[in-house]
Amino acid sequence: MEMEEKNMLCSSVVAPNFEEVCPEKVIKFKPPLYKQRYQFVRDLVDRHGPKKVADLGCGDTELLRLLKIYPCIQLLVGVDIDVEKLQSNGHHLSPYLGEFVKPRDLDLTVTLYHGSVVERDSRLLGFDLITCIELALQVANRYNYCVEFTGVGEPPVGAEHVGYCTQIGVFQKSSGKAPESCAAEQHDQHVYKAVYTTTYPSLQQEKMLKFVLVGEVLIQVDRLRLRHGRMLRERKKEESPKPPTTDPSRNPHLVLGTVFTEAEKTRIEGSPQPFCEGDKFFVPLQRLLAYPKLHRFHVGEERLRALIADSVCLSSDGSAVVVDLHNSWDYRPEEN
């Protein structure tokens, strides 16, 4: 965790009337301690990639808001005794418009529960990471955990003996079966009340996958169509008596503004070429799937065809996307 500035000793505390009210030295932490605690949790998420995360004593849900951006997390739960605070902050965890335009790869569900952490609720069983950074808890050895003690908020030079301002215990489940007394407690017991829940759009949802695929297909097809049009105009110029010009981007496996790796170029070159029939432009589905932005979805030709069939025009055999070669809004330099 990087510190923006070192923790400092201040000589006094100043009241609102700008008078010195305390001669004792005060330690200021930069970043503030709460931010250091949040960063500690984020570092754990980066290191372990948990799928299910809960925050006990989530309060204003600020930590949950920081964690919801992690692509590995698929279930995010907050528990707090203050129901009004949960109700007033739940909307901060709702998906933004941009998260519908560019959805996550994996599902994410966020739920806020009203309840006390001293009560057991079986819905918190099986979580990969549970945080309680604003609470003090005691955990017995009988639950089969090993513990590492650390902290944040290092003291300034000369006061190292004081230790961390915030002491942290990181409990990790030991290997092996849980004791019988612990296992017997794992039954359906729902004592918390859900006060807020939301589900984020993701590519695991067929509706969102279709939305994204259709958009990427249309963009890719139009780029190829425009490139093909430029190539046709260049050939026409070369056949004219005027001195020929060279277009360094005429290579058919390239798309304007895109840089491919050698492996990507090889994959694209090995796929069927786009072609024209009259005033129609055909782009084979296999060609589209060779481009990185569509290849990353790991859908086959048959699956892609099924998802886009009612949104784009396909060839009679369903093997290619078909569009008009020319559009009235296309830019043609020769017309200027």
Image: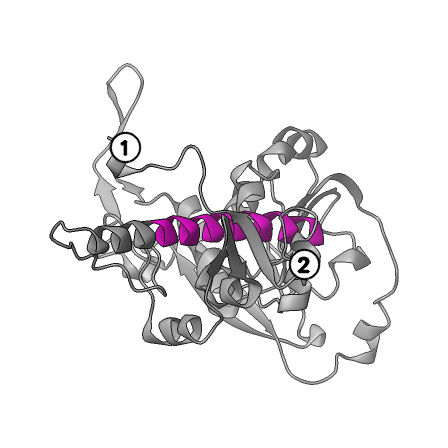
Q: Do the residues labelled 1 and 2 touch (CB within 8 Å)?
A: no
Q: Is residue 265 left or right of 117 when viewed as pictured?
A: left
Q: What type is the residue that disc 1 sits on?
A: Glu
Q: Where is residue 162 in the image (x, y as percent from the top left)?
A: 34, 57
Determine the residue located farthest toward the top in the rendered image: 17
For residue 59: magenta?
Answer: no
Is residue 160 shown above or below 93?
A: below
* Pointer 1 local density, CA inside 10 Å: few below 14, some 14–19, many at least 20: few
Q: At 75% from the left edge and 43% from the top edge, which residue is drawn? A: 115
Q: In the rendered view of the protein, which quadrant contains the N terminus?
A: bottom left
Q: At 82% from the left edge and 74% from the top edge, which residue is drawn? A: 183
Q: Earlier in the sequence, mark 1 or mark 2?
A: 2
Image quadrant in which you'd find residue 59: top right
Question: In terms of secondary structure, where does tag 1 sit?
Answer: helix
**Is most of the magenta stretch helix, strand or loop?**
helix
Q: Where is residue 186 in the image (x, y as percent from the top left)?
A: 83, 67
Range covered by the magenta-colored residues = 204-229
> Foreground residue, 93 or 333?
333
Q: What type is the residue that disc 2 sits on?
A: Ser
The numbered disc on residue 335 is 1
Q: Where is residue 222 in the image (x, y as percent from the top left)?
A: 45, 48
Q: Is residue 112 left or right of 146 when viewed as pictured?
A: right
The numbered disc on residue 316 is 2
Question: In terms of secondary structure, where does tag 2 sit?
Answer: loop
For residue 223: magenta?
Answer: yes
Determine the residue located farthest toward the bottom in the rendered image: 176
Q: Where is residue 321 in the image (x, y as percent from the top left)?
A: 57, 55
Q: At 63% from the left edge and 80% from the top edge, which residue is drawn? A: 174
> Foreground residue, 325 or 249?
325
The numbered disc on residue 107 is none
